[in-house]
Image (cartoon, rainbow, N blue to C red):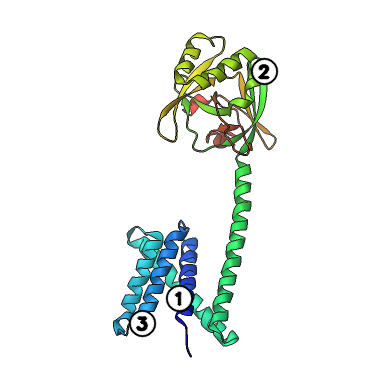
Amino acid sequence: MEYYIEFIIFQEFVVDFILLYITGSLLYKKIVFKRLIIASIIGVLYTIAVYSIDREFLNYFIIKFLVSVFMLTISYAPKGIIEYAKVILCFYILSILIMGIIILSYFIFNSRLTIILLFCAMFAVYMLFKILFYEIRRDKDYKDYLRDVSIYLNGNSIEVIGFIDTGNELIDTLSNKPVVIVDINYIKDLFSDDTFYEIKKAYDNGNDYLVDLMLKKLNNYNFRLLKYETISSCDDYMIGIVPSKTIIKYRGNQLCIDCVIGIYPKALSNDNKYQALLYKKILNWEGESVDANEYY
């Protein structure tokens, strides 16, 4: 029976890639497709070497084992002997199972190409369902972190949708209260037109004007100047306001939180699904009214 080199390359690449992918999925490893492709190519090169170079040592189990360990190292870079043992054991158990299925299928279809194509189709369906369920689960998880937020200040109030951002650890250093960050475009109704104009103008003119605004023009409000770090690690400033009351609503329950409202000069969500960033502690506080100072 003759086999073309193209078929051998295709078969080896597909089987190696699927084996490496399923191994990582079962062990909850981070899947980097570029790494899997490189590792699969190495498997292909080894197979070509076995077919092309007439050297008996290439078929020794120790050589095959070292090649598979090298492929797993490229794919997932395990740390420590235990991690290596888990990855190698999982890889070889899967290899035995899949090879058994392929051999059994050969007696049914009597065509290796048909078997490999069927194998690819099954893997494609698996990937399609995995992506579909991942998107459904991610959307559900995303909605679980959304809350209705009511903010009150001097007789005025606004309603916004807040997202619990576990990375929001901003704290007002003066009062030691956590900060709820709100899109500036949604806080206008809390202030007089003149005050809101001054806030917008301060952001347009930079940090020096923000400091000047706090010291001279907004003393009728309980304002704060909040210092925070941007993604580029540069210090920046945000205007904060101590509200009369802030209420979080979720599934019929209400939680009154003690916080400072940070006024952010840009949109917080590209798709406008939320207008405020809440903080992680709210997940622990829900169902009771608390003083934030007890936790900071």
Three-letter amino acid code at disc 1?
Answer: Ile
Badge nearest the viewer, 1 or 2 = 1
Give the residue pinned by disc 2: 156
The answer to whether residue 242 is visible is no
Residue 133 against residue 63 in the figure, above or below: above
Q: What element carries label 2?
A: strand
In primary-sequence order, the first of circles 1 and 2 is 1
Q: Are marks 1 and 2 in contact (CB under 8 Å)?
A: no
Three-letter amino acid code at disc 3?
Answer: Ser
Badge nearest the viewer, 2 or 3 = 3
Give the residue pinned by disc 1: 9
The answer to whether residue 284 is visible is yes
Dividing the picture into quadrants, the one containing residue 200 is: top right
Give the residue pinned by disc 3: 52
Dividing the picture into quadrants, the one containing residue 69 is: bottom left
Q: Distance between the residues labelled 3 and 1?
A: 13 Å
Q: How far apart are marks 2 and 3 (CA)?
A: 81 Å
Q: Which residue is drawn at 52% across and 80% down?
A: 102
